[in-house]
Image (cartoon, rainbow, N blue to C red):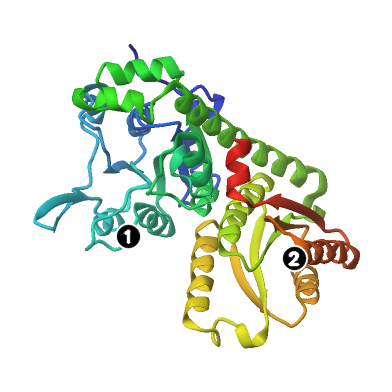
Amino acid sequence: MNEPRSTASSAQEDILSTLKERPAGRLKIYIGSAAGVGKTYQMLLEAQRLRSEGVDVVLGYIETHNRAETAALVGDLEKVPVRRIRYQDRLFDEMNLPAILERRPQIVVVDELAHSNIPGTEHPKRYQDVEDILKAGINVISAVNIQHIESLNPYVERLTGVKVRETVPDRVLALASEIINIDLSVEDHRERLRRGKIYPTEKVESALRGFFTPENLAAMREMALREVASKVEYQTEEQRLLREAGPLRRLERVVVCLGPDHAANVALLRRGARVAGRLNADWFAVTVVRPELAPGKALSPVRKEFLKLERLAEELGARFEVLEAHSVLDALVSFVEEHGITLAIFGKNRHVGWRLRMFKWLTLEFLNHTEGVDVQIVDTDERDASARN
């Protein structure tokens, strides 16, 4: 069976065609539905092609997983030596960020974008290494599976029953100038697994019964296709607006209005990331608190909740702000006017009694006190969402 190739029309394009059009430090991501679709293979094919055309390209880190066809493609491509780090009496190979920055190639290929680094490196996560490389003006080609995207994490867990621990923030995907889907049919994918092209033979049967069931692979495949199609749609729409309206076009800006329920806020932030991503919009996450309960004055447990929300919001690409005010309505109205917000998202989560009346009053009064702002109300109850799925 031949190695899979990308079905996207843009898969035949590469960074070379635009090196002279935009500044260095561009990111290209190959995305797949699961391990074994051929992301690393495609990156190596592109690296070989780029080198044959005179581009200075190196391998920052490649994981062949002992797949013969993939290993053969490495060939004589220049590899930046990895770092060997001892941790808990074992030696681990990690990408050598300082060596890449010193070498300064035009393009570096970095596999396994969601990888967690061993303690002793510059950053806890490989995507943070990639951000440093981009800041240094070096172009990056990388790869990730769809289940590792942070905002999709709860959907993946509900669909597959698998909790994915390593994730990549949506803000990293937003950095990408190009995202390529590497597509493979469900049956071809399972056949590759049976033939030992993904995992060692002893792990095949458990994998076929676990994550690699036909239902799971079909769901992940659809998710990956939608993600890439949305990215192409954003770019096409953005170009159209620029052509038609120039500098006078309306920029979409989203605010997610957080409430007192921490679990609901987590779900709301992830939904906000998806909505903002579809609109290709800047977005904010705000919570309104009375001045005496502001993070700097609140008790330790309350402060910890604020910090958790802030970390998640920033990981998802939002700007997190705490608004100190006695009136939630006045604070939100002032915020949307000051920041040019075009869409406000509120979360509805099992409101009953006076809470339900307060929620209805707040959203209605918000609409009455703002102009040019759309309102979206989303269900943040994970149990209801799970049942619907």
User: Circle 2 is placed at which residue position?
Assistant: 355
Q: Residues within 10 Å of mark 2 (few under 14, many from 20)?
A: few
Could you tell me residue 188's position as x and y percent? 40, 15
Q: Is 256 above or below relative to 190?
A: below
Looking at this view, name the residue that lies furthest to the right.
368
Q: Looking at the image, can residue 278 be seen?
A: yes
Which is nearer the N-term, disc 2 or disc 1?
1
Looking at this view, name the residue that lies furthest to the top.
1
User: Circle 1 is placed at which residue position?
Assistant: 124
Label 2 to label 1: alpha-carbon separation: 41 Å
Looking at this view, name the residue that lies furthest to the front.
353
Image quadrant where residue 141 sits: top left
Q: Looking at the image, can residue 13 be seen?
A: no
Q: Is 366 above or below relative to 107?
A: below
- Pick the front one: 42 or 365: 365
Could you tell me residue 372's position as x and y percent? 86, 58
Could you tell me residue 260's position as x and y percent? 63, 69
Image quadrant where residue 64 sits: top left
Asked whether disc 2 touches disc 1, contact meaning CB atoms under 8 Å apart, the reply is: no
Left or right for 81, reference 171: left
Q: What secondary structure is found at the residue carrying circle 1?
A: loop
Q: What secondary structure is found at the residue carrying circle 2?
A: helix
Q: Residues within 10 Å of mark 1 (few under 14, many from 20)?
A: some
Left or right for 328, reference 173: right
Residue at x 66%, y 44% (from the top left corner): 278
Q: Three-letter amino acid code at disc 1? A: Pro
Left or right for 289, reference 161: right
Q: Three-letter amino acid code at disc 2? A: Arg
